[in-house]
């Protein structure tokens, strides 16, 4: 797929490249004949490209291509599939800088973080390439003599992959790599804010040698392309990362067909700071996890639950560090905080600032940054509220922007109650020098990820990633656990006794 492989009539101009869907190894236009633009959120005058506005008919073609490719792919030995993943990982490493720059331009996160996003994609490609030679099942004794028992993983079929814009390369790879190494074929729908990142990934997948039809890309709106993938009777497993509201809708529809479904949804992540904590370390960790990626990480810290005795001291440190953060285009290496993803996101954060004014006290920020070069992008000043109560709306609802609520409490028990008193359960952190308190937190936090003396972000790909409660539905991405989404277990018994052994009856009376 090249920049100009598909230039829909009247859509792409000389300086705005057009891109197709990628179906059955070919670049194709949408049957809708319509396209949409992706723009740079740091400067909305900059159009990244024009992309196909997909339809249910496009999805049907992609699903058909994936079905046709499935028999050959699933019968390719898993170590051979793994070799293609490995080549894809190596190609991403080779093109890391180009991919990171394209990501910053389309999504806004600063270059250092975009490189990190690409690196996570590389890491999962290599990790899952190795699974091609592992993908262990069990061999286990049978309860009967002369009988062999084992379990193996098998692919499920066509995997529908629906992803958000905030990790536009890492998250698609976190899903596609385990799906593919396990022998599934893929229909991939990226977020409409980051279709170019998806195109760049798929280009490298083609170069790595994934056979035609193994990976299919359909761009377009969630309610058209996403719904069609969810509803397709021929897509047997779905993996979705996005908002809880969208995820719940997908869960209802998928349940009608009893589809396998992995959901990674919202978060409201807290960092606890106990009275004995190293406040310098805590402030560094909190500012990084609250305002990096402009607060748009699913694991971003949006609540600081602090022992009242050190609240003022911590706040002073948070404030001075946050004041020093530089806003701007992420392509400028001196910038700390890029733009929000789009105008809707800026409006939402603004709305929560209004709500926050009647709940806590605004310490810093609270408005868009529109001066000079920033006037063409969706920039928002990092914002801190103090004296927020645990059940206030800004302490309960996912804002997904640079807004941090500081919640004073009295001691460890009250801190744990505040951490757990939300609908979500993705990530939580504790800053303390007390090893007993740290171990209690590791036990008590109702979250899928816990950090001790570090901020709430920083997941590594070889551990399970995901959340409790309304953050998900019990599945996990990454680590070995990721294979559970994309495989069916098969238990196999081989009887070499030469006679009929009636299991569960015979073994009681045997002997
Ligand atoms: P979103 O729910 O708006 O969109 C996610 C994807 O779903 C997009 O590709 C979108 O086009 C598609 N979609 C929208 N409506 C659909 C429908 N009816 N059917 C099928 N697909 C549909 O989320 P977003 O704004 O792109 O991402 C931000 C959200 O993602 C936040 O809530 C964040 O917490 C969450 N997130 C969670 C994790 C995690 O691992 N838990 C990671 C990253 C982001």
Image (tube, grey):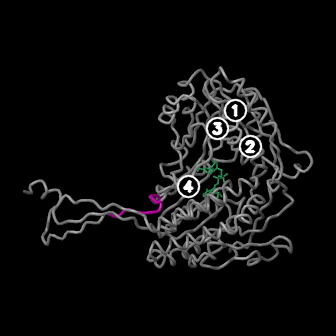
Residue 166 among magenta residues: no
> CA–CA distance between discs 1 and 4?
28 Å
> CA–CA distance between discs 4 and 3?
27 Å
**Residue linked to disc 1:** 280
> CA–CA distance between discs 1 and 3?
28 Å
Identify the mark nearer the N-term, 1 or 4. 1
> SS of the residue at dot 4?
loop
> SS of the residue at dot 1?
helix
**Residue linked to disc 2:** 348
Q: Quadrant of residue 211?
A: bottom right
Q: Nearer the viewer, mark 1 or mark 3?
A: 1
Identify the mark nearer the N-term, 1 or 3. 1
Identity of the residue drawn at 60% across and 43% down: 267
Front position in the image: 118 or 472: 118
Front position in the image: 505 or 96: 96
Crowding near pointer 2: few (<14 within 10 Å), some, many (20+)? some
Identify the mark nearer the N-term, 2 or 4. 2
**Residue linked to disc 4:** 461
> CA–CA distance between discs 1 and 2?
31 Å
Identify the mark nearer the N-term, 3 or 2. 2
Stretch in magenta: 483-490
> CA–CA distance between discs 2 and 4?
31 Å
Identity of the residue drawn at 65% across and 26% down: 389
Q: Is residue 275 above or below residue 281?
A: above
Can you tell which mark lies on residue 397? 3
């Amino acid at each position: 797929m090249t920049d100009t492989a598909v230039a829909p009539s009247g859509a792409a101009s000389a300086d705005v490249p057009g891109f197709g869907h990628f179906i059955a190894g070919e670049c194709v236009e949408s049957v809708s004949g319509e396209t949409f633009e992706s723009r740079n959120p740091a400067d909305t005058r900059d159009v990244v490209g024009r992309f196909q506005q997909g339809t249910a008919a496009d999805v049907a073609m992609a699903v058909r291509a994936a079905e046709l490719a499935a028999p050959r792919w699933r019968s390719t030995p898993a170590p051979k599939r793994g070799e293609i993943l490995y080549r894809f990982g190596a190609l991403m490493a080779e093109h890391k800088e180009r991919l990171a720059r394209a990501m910053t331009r389309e999504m806004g996160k600063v270059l250092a973080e975009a490189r990190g996003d690409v690196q996570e994609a590389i890491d999962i490609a290599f990790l899952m390439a190795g699974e091609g030679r592992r993908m262990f099942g069990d061999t286990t004794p049978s309860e009967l003599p002369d009988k062999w028992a084992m379990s193996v993983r098998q692919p499920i079929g066509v995997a529908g992959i629906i992803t958000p814009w905030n990790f536009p390369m890492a998250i698609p790879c976190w899903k596609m790599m385990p799906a593919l190494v396990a022998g599934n074929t893929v229909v991939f729908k990226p977020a409409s804010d980051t279709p170019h990142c998806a195109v760049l990934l798929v280009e490298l997948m083609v170069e790595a040698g994934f056979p035609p039809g193994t990976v299919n890309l359909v761009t377009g709106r969630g309610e058209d392309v996403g719904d069609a993938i969810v509803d397709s009777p021929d897509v047997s497993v779905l993996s979705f990362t996005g908002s809880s509201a969208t995820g719940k809708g997908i869960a209802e529809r998928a349940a009608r067909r009893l589809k396998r479904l992995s959901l990674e949804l919202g978060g409201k992540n807290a960092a606890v700071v106990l009275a004995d904590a190293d406040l310098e370390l805590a402030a560094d960790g909190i500012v990084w996890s609250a305002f990096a990626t402009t607060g748009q990480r699913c694991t971003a810290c949006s609540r600081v639950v602090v022992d009242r005795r050190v609240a003022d001291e911590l706040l002073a440190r948070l404030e001075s560090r946050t004041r020093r953060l530089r806003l701007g285009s992420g392509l400028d290496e001196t910038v700390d905080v890029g733009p929000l993803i789009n105008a809707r996101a800026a409006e939402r954060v603004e709305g929560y600032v209004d709500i926050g004014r009647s709940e806590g006290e605004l310490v810093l920020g609270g408005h868009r940054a529109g001066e000079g070069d920033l006037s063409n992008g969706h920039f928002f000043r990092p914002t801190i509220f103090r004296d927020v109560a645990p059940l206030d709306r800004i302490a309960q609802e996912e804002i997904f922007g640079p807004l941090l609520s500081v919640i004073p409490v009295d001691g460890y028990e009250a801190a744990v109650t505040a951490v757990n008193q939300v609908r979500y359960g993705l990530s939580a952190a504790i800053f303390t020098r007390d090893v007993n308190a740290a171990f209690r937190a590791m036990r008590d936090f109702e979250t899928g990820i816990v950090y001790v003396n570090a901020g709430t972000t920083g997941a590594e790909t070889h551990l399970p990633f995901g959340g409790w409660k309304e953050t998900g539905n019990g599945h996990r991405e990454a680590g070995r656990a990721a294979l559970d989404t994309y495989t069916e277990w098969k238990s196999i018994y081989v009887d070499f006794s030469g006679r009929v052994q009636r299991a569960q009856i015979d073994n009681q009376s045997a002997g």
